[in-house]
Image (cartoon, helix red, strand yellow):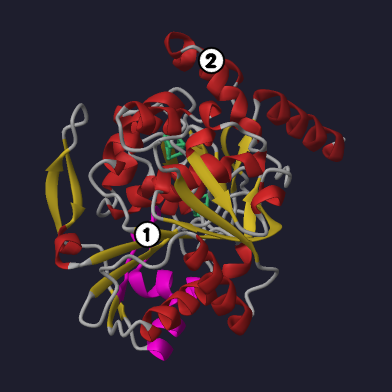
Amino acid sequence: MQQKTKVSAVNCESYDLPLLEEKIRTAVELAGGWPEKIKPGAKVLLKPNLLSAKTPDQCVTTHPELVRAVIRELRKKGVEKITIADSPAGIYTWEELWEKTGMKKVADEEKVELLPLENFERVEVPGHGYIPLLKELKDFDVFISLPKLKTHILTKITVAVKNSYGLIVGESKSAFHATAPSPRKMSNLIAAVYGKIKPDFVIVDAIESMQGDGPANGKPFKSGIVMAGYDAVAIDACACTAYGYKPQDIQLLVKVAELGFGDIRRENIDLVGDAAERLGKLKIPRSKSDILHRFPESMFHMLTLIMTYRPFIIQETCIKCGKCFKACSQKAILSEGGSFRVLKKKCILCMCCLEACPVKAVELRSPFQKFMAFLNLFKKKS
Ligand code: SF4
Ligand code: SF4
């Protein structure tokens, strides 16, 4: 009989450190214990989700206290060489990213290294050309993925499988959206990249998850769970149920399974822990752009021009920093007299401008919402 893949889900109500350490310990034990490679002398890479320079309460990035708790647990196993690394989607300095996300404080206090993702080597990803991956990756003995449970406007959810995509170096992540403009194509690309960077172990921060228009513009949702396991695909197949999805609803998971990188069939996954049942009952609100996934590929671009939610720059909120302009690989943001606006025809809905904006001045709006905003403006003036 085929052995089931173990995934654990453990209740954890807060980021209080002693509680977190205890819950992480339990989640790891239930998932089968730490990998054997975790031992004195091992070089360990921790990869949280550091999508952009946001504070922990905004729920965009993996909480620093979860990273701290993992470091302390690894120390107990005698691991000394620990490095934290991730690459943001927006245009931020490394210092700004690490400071805002709380990683600098954790790294300084726990005496671990923060590695800027700057060196790369090009790795062939079948069907997608050569992709620049973190060069130092091969120097580590163990890669532990520390994703956040979030929605994603293109891939529906972002958890463990997508977290590996963050090891692509630099702004090229934005440029790849140009070659994979639809949710389906983007999911296929991320699945192929995952095949090149599979983690050895995963611990998911689902204590506060993201609801709505993730990965950057959603709102926090208190879900109170830590998940762990060896197989990122199996973890995502369980995690998606928190939003009421089945694994088969997520193109990214369908594709990784098709490529043979994991099994998404729930009958082959053993979900254990005191939060195992509650996980699938959380009903975390999804992104409103889920509707995009119902379009046939051939109609995708045409239909998105007419009726899709698309980025809109709120001039009253915009601080004119130009980060969206620099992040746009399609030159779909026009800079005019110090102001910025989105050119609908050029936009491929990669959402990099949303991720890059530090003040939430880029919002997703449908043509109908734009019309209503115009009417309100007109009413105020008259
Ligand atoms: S305007 Fe924004 S969503 Fe559109 S292509 Fe540029 S970065 Fe992507
Ligand atoms: S929309 Fe946001 S990122 Fe773009 S210029 Fe304004 S504040 Fe900066």
Residue behind mark 1: 201
First in sequence, mark 2 or 1: give its number: 1
Position of 325 with respect to 282 (left or right) is left
Residue 101, compared with residue 126, is above or below; it is below
Q: Which image quadrant for residue 220?
A: bottom right
Q: Residue at x 43, y 33 (%)?
A: 252
Disc 1 crowd rating (10 Å Cα; few below 14, some 14-19, many 20+) is many
Q: Quadrant of the N terminus?
A: top left
Total number of numbered discs in the rendering: 2
| Residue 161 coordinates in the image, percent (x, y) | 40, 45
Disc 2 crowd rating (10 Å Cα; few below 14, some 14-19, many 20+) is some
| Residue 210 coordinates in the image, percent (x, y) | 62, 52
Q: Quadrant of the C terminus?
A: top right
Q: Which is nearer the eye, 265 or 248? A: 265
**Magenta highlight range:** 83-110
Q: Amino acid at mark 1?
A: Phe
- On residue 295, which mark appears? 2
Task: Say if residue 325 shows up in the picture.
Answer: no
